[in-house]
Image (cartoon, rainbow, N blue to C red):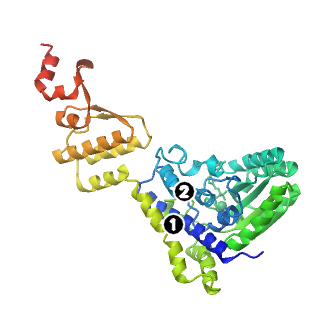
Amino acid sequence: MKIDSKLKIKMLYEMLRIRMFEERIQQLYLQGRIPGSMHLSTGQEAIPVGFCLNLKSDDYIISSHRGHHHILAKGGEYKYMMAELFGRVTGYCKGKGGSMHIACAKIGVLGANGIVGGGICIAAGVGFASRYLNDGKVTISFFGEGASNTGAFHEGLNFAALRKSNVVFVIENNQYAISVTRNLSDCIEKQSIRASGYGIPGITIDGNDVLEVYKTAYEAINRARKGDGPTLVECMTYRWHGHHAGEPKDGLLYRSQEEIDSWKKKDPIKRLKDDLIKNMEIRLTKYNSVKSINKDLEDIFERFPILWERRNQLAGTLSGGEQQLLAIARGLMSRPKLLLMDEPSLGLSPLMINEVAKVIQDINQRGVSVLLVEQNIPLALKVASRGYALNVGRIVLEGDINEFRATETVKKAYLGE
Ligand SMILES: Cc1ncc(C[n+]2csc(CCOP(=O)(O)OP(=O)(O)O)c2C)c(N)n1
Ligand SMILES: [Mg+2]
């Protein structure tokens, strides 16, 4: 099979798109700006790119807990991914899924999955539905070598092989399941030989060679589309970072720097880039222009003027009020419809009260109502439209907030005059 330069450049672009996205979100995560946890795929980009470039837009993929690269390769857009990670309503799952539970049926992403091996049987079923309906669609199930030691793997492969489901099972063998090296969990050298137990083809390939992945994927996907049943493809690769973002020592507690460096030399992006330049298929300037997609990411990030940003600035420069802001930020992490603030002005300087007012207005604009318990009338006037004066839990005055300007009115209400 001949892969032309145009397609190779597309592969390069897609891999860089994933790498840059993950480099950026890693930074943001380590700065504490993204809630929840996330698993990076840096070093493994060639696998979903080689597979997804063989798919049609209405084919399906099912991902794992380490899924950003799969989703981006299947057409996921930065802005919706980013919004999802930040827990925003504009994200793929309205901000309720986060890194490990991104799904979008429109682009054929039937879900990342926090349950290790959780996608395998779903894929076997979806692939069976395609075969039964004869709709010509193919489903790819991506998972790790740890997942292929779960019962779901055997159940899913057996069912899919028996029913000739339109599915391809892809093991991303990155050598580790959290801190457990595959030598401690596997009794065979190549997991692909397990395919013979289900009478389907199995193959182990270099998962860091995007051209090899593409060719293998082409065969396996065509076979599934024709109704000839599933294939098991094991792609040997390596994750550059720790199991999850922020893991202590970034994974160095259970593996050596030499090992990591030796895999970095097999970087799938560098390999394709060097190959293209060596064969005069692209010039370095072209590579740099492909790389300039990083700019898109910056632009998108600019559109997320997040509260945490402001929180950090304030916490860094002002004392006293930072606890208030941290509490507000923490409260917002659960994406409430209503936020109750109990005397946010307490102990704050006038400057800080102004900042708190800005934050409250900001929250309001983002569709979260704020219930403010506050005796600082100037602050209340800045942010509220209605006011209630309470005396031992009893509403003694209710009305337009402007009425509260006259403290006398409140006093009168308190005293019941
Ligand atoms: C059913 C289940 N068991 C255990 C876990 C905890 N867990 C999360 S990721 C992981 C390792 C998975 O390894 P692998 O399948 O190789 O994927 P990788 O993280 O290497 O991409 C484990 C055990 C889980 N999430 N679900
Ligand atoms: Mg693994």
Q: Position of residue 25 (x, y in %)?
A: 48, 60
**Residue at image coords 62%, 70%:** 10
Q: Residues within 10 Å of mark 2 (few under 14, many from 20)?
A: few
Q: Where 402 falls versus 206 (above or below)? A: above
Q: Earlier in the sequence, mark 2 or mark 1?
A: 1
Q: Where 145 falls versus 415 (above or below)? A: below
> Where is residue 187, by image quadrant?
bottom right
Q: Which quadrant of the rendered structure holds the N terminus?
A: bottom right
Of marks 2 and 1, the one in the foreground: 2
Q: Position of residue 9 (x, y in %)?
A: 61, 74
Mark 2 Cβ and ligand 1 under 8 Å apart: no
Q: Position of residue 350 (x, y in %)?
A: 16, 44
Residue 412 located left or right of residue 31: left
Numbered disc 2: secondary structure: loop
Q: Which quadrant of the rendered structure holds the C terminus?
A: top left
> Where is residue 172, by image quadrant?
bottom right
Numbered disc 1: secondary structure: helix
**Residue at image coords 32%, 44%:** 362
Instruction: Determine whether label 2 and label 1 are within 8 Å by CB.
Output: no
Mark 1 Cβ and ligand 1 under 8 Å apart: no
**Residue at image coords 72%, 68%:** 214
**Residue at image coords 59%, 77%:** 270
Q: Amino acid at mark 2?
A: Glu
Q: Where 207 falls versus 143 (above or below)? A: below
Residue to which mark 1 is pinned = 20
Residue to which mark 2 is pinned = 77
Query: What label does residue 213 carry, if any?
Result: none
| Quadrant of ligand 2 in image | bottom right
